[in-house]
Image: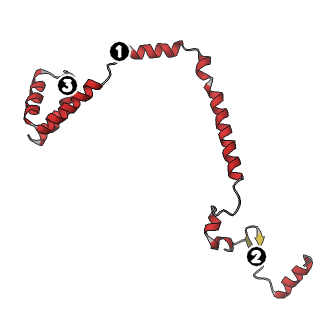
Amino acid sequence: MNANGCDRVKELLAPWVRAELGAADRRFVEDHVDGCGECSAEASLVRALHAGAPILPDDLVERVTASIAATPLRRRVWMGPRLAAAAIVVLALGTALMWRQPPGNGNGVLVEEPLAMTWPTDDGFIAGVAMLDDLSDEALAELLEELGG
């Protein structure tokens, strides 16, 4: 059949299976499904899905709402403090495991980038240690003598 007819039938298949269509639409879908193999296969699939769907009682929402309202508040909120305590324990254990990791295992960014260890900064310090490149040999010797070396 034509694509336009197939598109219209595919929109109507679910209501057709549930017997919710008027006479004209129902007749249109039945005639099309009889003559179109693709739509016939899709109709079979929709029928199977509809047959396997559970039938929910009409008053399900009211029953669930009444059940929630009847449950004591104390019973509904006991989980809050326990859940917070469990989250704190997990956070503490995770932090402890991170601190126990041995140094120099190659996971750090500085270890992966060799120039990052020696790249000078604008303030004259590398990793908190003063840069001594611009000192003369005499100034370095004097500094070494002051430091007791």
| Residue where numbered disc 3 is placed | 17
Mark 2 and mark 3 lie on one chain; the one further toward the N terminus is 3
* Tag 2–tag 3 contact (CB < 8 Å): no
10 Å crowding of disc 3: few (<14), some (14-19), many (20+): some
From the viewer's perspective, is residue 57 above or below residue 17?
Answer: above
Mark 1 and mark 3 lie on one chain; the one further toward the N terminus is 3
Mark 3 secondary-structure assignment? helix
Percent from the top left, x then y, of residue 21? Answer: 17, 23
Mark 2 secondary-structure assignment? loop
Q: CA distance from mark 1 to mark 3?
A: 20 Å
Residue at point 64%, 64% (across, down): 106
Mark 1 and mark 2 lie on one chain; the one further toward the N terminus is 1
Quadrant in which residue 62 is drawn: top left
10 Å crowding of disc 2: few (<14), some (14-19), many (20+): some
Residue at point 11%, 32% (across, down): 33
Q: Nearer the viewer, residue 35 or 148?
A: 35
Q: Nearer the viewer, residue 7 or 134?
A: 7
| Residue where numbered disc 1 is placed | 57
Quadrant in which residue 92 is drawn: top right
Residue at point 58%, 14% (across, down): 72
| Residue where numbered disc 2 is placed | 131
From the viewer's perspective, is residue 56 above or below residue 105?
Answer: above
**Pair 1/2: label in front:** 1
Percent from the top left, x then y, of residue 129? Answer: 77, 70
